[in-house]
Image: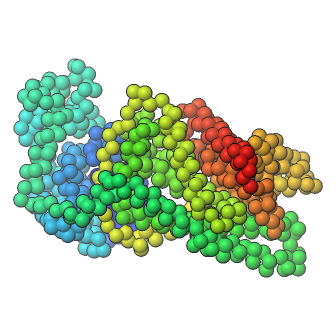
């Protein structure tokens, strides 16, 4: 049995998916959080006798089946090309009138359907009421109210899904639209996967000789409106009739409106945003994060000190002893050193998102983003880019304008992903111990400034960003437990991936540093494979202040995965050495950090960028452009620093 979850954006669909499957899909107050159909399974009580679990598909949130963006197209393709056994339509009780617009479209698909009514507790708290039984009678499909922390509604929902084996009754619209709807049904010429409303909404794409054209022309003559406008108006009239007598909307709180004016539409909104983000970075990279990092960083050194005296007695091979003490333990130390700042950063961002503030920040920054050809909708990919570039680039699919979407894909990698945090944290604490948080904040701002500059330089003639429409979720006190669980899950996934990558990177770097091109033991690091390769690249980096084989080798490793930069530096620093010794001055170290921020993303990110751009040539040009931008920025900063006598 396959159940497809369909609903508006920010209606609680992914939360329900997680409750049913036990999965941990990311839940956010953003459109486009689910950019592809996520799949899960569960075995409810009423299916225990069956060997086959229920498959659940979490479709991207949409307001309509008309595909104006990539996430809407994904939902429509899944429903039309691979019809599920049951559609589970999730609707938000706080905004029921808007949510039912999609419900009426789903009824036209003639697939068994159940409606899950979420946010009922919030509706009641706002003085509203929804009669699920009356809605069931009017829609002709089961409507099940759900309450947080109460599994009774969940059990009732599972029972309704099990019984949903018959298509819903045909829901007919009224007036001239209803007559046209019936005439189209009588034609029997609907393409596979299309709906009656689909023909009306896409009438301009039909050939002049299509049998539907005379019906659509009669509808236009009778209503004086284009068919798609007449259809939308009639749907809203039908929704008003449906809700009459069984639904009372809630009232907005005055305090909520005052808070929105302060955070979105006042002169203090931007200073408040800057202050909040500065506080986030201070807590993550300031004294708190730095002290925790130093404690964890000492663990591998302590472990190495305990292991070293016992290794010869255990007759350990010399090469294995060297690998453990010179490669593996320093690499693990580099991982542990940045876990506290990353944990604090992810937790604070999750709390801000859960509170509803980040959505308001998108509105706040919509006007500045339009000056570079983007809109507030592009803020989500960029915010996600601070975590990982791959899902951030995928999230750009929710941008309707192809030109804006392409620009967002190209600018998002300039947002500093979390894989770069280890390098920032280690070098900032080594060279700028009292100003580490300020240095890291400057790096993040440098990435944003680079994106703004490139956006301003892009060709924006005759291009205008699409209108930005986004529902503001209610401001609420974030749940520390939920945010902590989400953060630990994301951190665990990131750590598992990083441990494997760093183990591979440290092993590869140690081998390349230990062997010559003839695969014999290298008498010196300069004669090794890594030394010769990095030595060829190092002169190109000399104007940037770090033209050494060690820095070049670390940057080359970073092309595979940014997590490998710090582990490579740790391995090349040698047993007991400090990565700070690999750079001649604080200015050179900062120049290296700036280069790390801006240069070509990792292979996984570039592969995703190539797929989203749909052009290998454009992706290659972008990769070269990132490297050139990094070289120019680092060289400029270093040369100006030397000119003004910076240390």
Q: Nearer the viewer, residue 569 or 452?
A: 452
Q: Residue at x 64, y 50 (%)?
A: 594
Q: Which of 607 and 346 is in front in this view?
A: 346
Q: Which of 578 and 157 is in front in this view?
A: 578
Q: Residue at x 91, y 54 (%)?
A: 524
**Whole-percent x and y of residue 245?**
6, 59
| Numbered disc total | 0
Q: Is residue 342 left or right of residue 371?
A: right
Given the current orientation, which residue lies at the most extreme front position? 644
Picture quarter with the N terminus: bottom left
Q: Is residue 19 left or right of residue 147?
A: right
Picture quarter with the C terminus: bottom right
**Whole-percent x and y of residue 86?**
28, 54
**Whole-percent x and y of residue 97?**
17, 52
Which quadrant of the view contains residue 195? top left
Indicate the colouring scheme. rainbow
Which quadrant of the view contains residue 190? top left
- Is residue 167 visible from the viewing direction of this image? no
- Is residue 629 visible from the viewing direction of this image? yes
Q: Residue at x 46, y 71 (%)?
A: 484
Q: In this view, does 448 lie to the left or right of 90?
A: right
Q: Residue at x 24, y 60 (%)?
A: 257
Given the current orientation, which residue lies at the most extreme right position? 523
Which quadrant of the view contains residue 143? bottom left
Q: Is residue 577 left or right of residue 458?
A: right
**Whole-percent x and y of residue 50?**
36, 66
Given the current orientation, which residue lies at the most extreme top position? 209
Q: Which of 200 and 627 is in front in this view?
A: 627
| In this view, 620 is above or below 304 | above
């Amino acid at each position: 049995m396959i159940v497809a979850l369909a609903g508006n954006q920010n209606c609680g669909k992914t939360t329900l998916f997680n409750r049913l499957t036990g999965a941990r899909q990311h839940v956010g107050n953003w459109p486009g959080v689910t950019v592809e159909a996520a799949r899960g399974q569960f075995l409810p009580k009423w299916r225990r006798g069956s060997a086959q679990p229920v498959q659940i598909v979490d479709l991207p949130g949409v307001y309509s089946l008309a595909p104006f963006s990539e996430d809407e197209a994904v939902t429509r393709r899944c429903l039309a090309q691979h019809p599920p056994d049951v559609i589970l339509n999730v609707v938000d009780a706080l905004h029921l009138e808007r949510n039912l617009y999609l419900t009426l479209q789903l009824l036209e698909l003639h697939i068994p359907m159940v409606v899950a009514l979420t946010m009922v507790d919030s509706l009641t708290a706002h003085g509203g009421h929804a009669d699920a039984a009356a809605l069931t009678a009017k829609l002709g499909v089961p409507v099940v109210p759900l309450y947080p922390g109460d599994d009774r509604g969940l059990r009732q929902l599972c029972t309704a899904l099990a019984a949903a084996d018959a298509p819903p009754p045909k829901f007919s619209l009224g007036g001239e639209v209803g007559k046209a709807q019936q005439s189209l049904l009588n034609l029997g010429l609907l393409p596979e996967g299309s709906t009656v409303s689909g023909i009306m909404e896409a009438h301009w794409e039909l050939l002049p000789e299509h049998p539907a054209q005379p019906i659509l022309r009669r509808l236009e003559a009778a209503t004086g409106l284009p068919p798609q406008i007449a259809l939308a108006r009639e749907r809203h009239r039908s929704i008003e009739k449906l809700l009459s007598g069984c639904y009372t909307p809630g009232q907005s709180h005055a305090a909520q409106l005052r808070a929105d004016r302060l955070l979105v539409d006042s002169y203090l909104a931007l200073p408040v945003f800057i202050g909040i983000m500065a506080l986030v970075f201070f807590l993550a990279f300031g004294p708190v994060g730095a002290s925790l990092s130093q404690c964890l960083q000492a663990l591998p050194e302590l472990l190495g000190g305990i292991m070293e005296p016992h290794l010869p007695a255990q007759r350990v091979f010399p090469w294995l002893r060297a690998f453990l003490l010179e490669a593996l333990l320093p690499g693990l130390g580099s991982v542990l050193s940045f876990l506290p700042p990353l944990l604090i950063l992810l937790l604070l961002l999750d709390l801000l998102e859960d509170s509803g503030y980040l959505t308001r920040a998108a509105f706040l920054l919509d006007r500045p983003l339009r000056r570079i050809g983007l809109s507030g909708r592009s803020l989500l990919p960029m915010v996600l880019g601070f975590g990982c570039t791959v899902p951030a680039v995928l999230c750009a699919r929710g941008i309707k304008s192809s030109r804006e979407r392409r620009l967002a894909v190209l600018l998002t990698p300039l947002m500093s992903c979390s894989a770069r945090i280890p390098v920032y944290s280690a070098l900032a604490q080594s060279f700028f111990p009292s100003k580490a948080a300020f240095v890291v904040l400057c790096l993040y701002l440098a990435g944003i400034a680079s994106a703004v500059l490139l956006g301003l330089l892009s060709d924006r003639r005759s291009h205008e960003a699409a209108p930005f429409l986004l529902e503001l979720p209610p401001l609420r006190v974030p749940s520390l437990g939920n945010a902590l669980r989400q953060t630990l899950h994301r951190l665990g996934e990131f750590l598992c991936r990083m441990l494997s990558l760093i183990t591979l990177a440290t092993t590869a770097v140690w081998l390349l540093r230990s062997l010559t091109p003839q695969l014999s033991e290298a008498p010196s690091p300069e004669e090794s494979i890594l030394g010769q390769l990095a030595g060829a690249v190092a002169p190109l980096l000399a104007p940037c202040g770090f033209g050494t084989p060690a820095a070049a080798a670390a940057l080359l490793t970073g092309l595979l995965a940014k997590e490998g930069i710090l582990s490579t530096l740790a391995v090349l620093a040698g047993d007991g050495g400090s990565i700070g010794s690999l750079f001649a001055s604080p200015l050179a170290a900062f120049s290296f950090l700036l280069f790390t921020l801006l240069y070509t993303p990792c292979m996984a990110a570039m592969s995703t960028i190539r797929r989203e751009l749909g052009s290998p040539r454009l992706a290659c040009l972008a990769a070269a452009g990132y490297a050139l931008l990094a070289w120019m920025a680092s060289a400029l900063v270093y040369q100006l620093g030397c000119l003004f006598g910076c240390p």
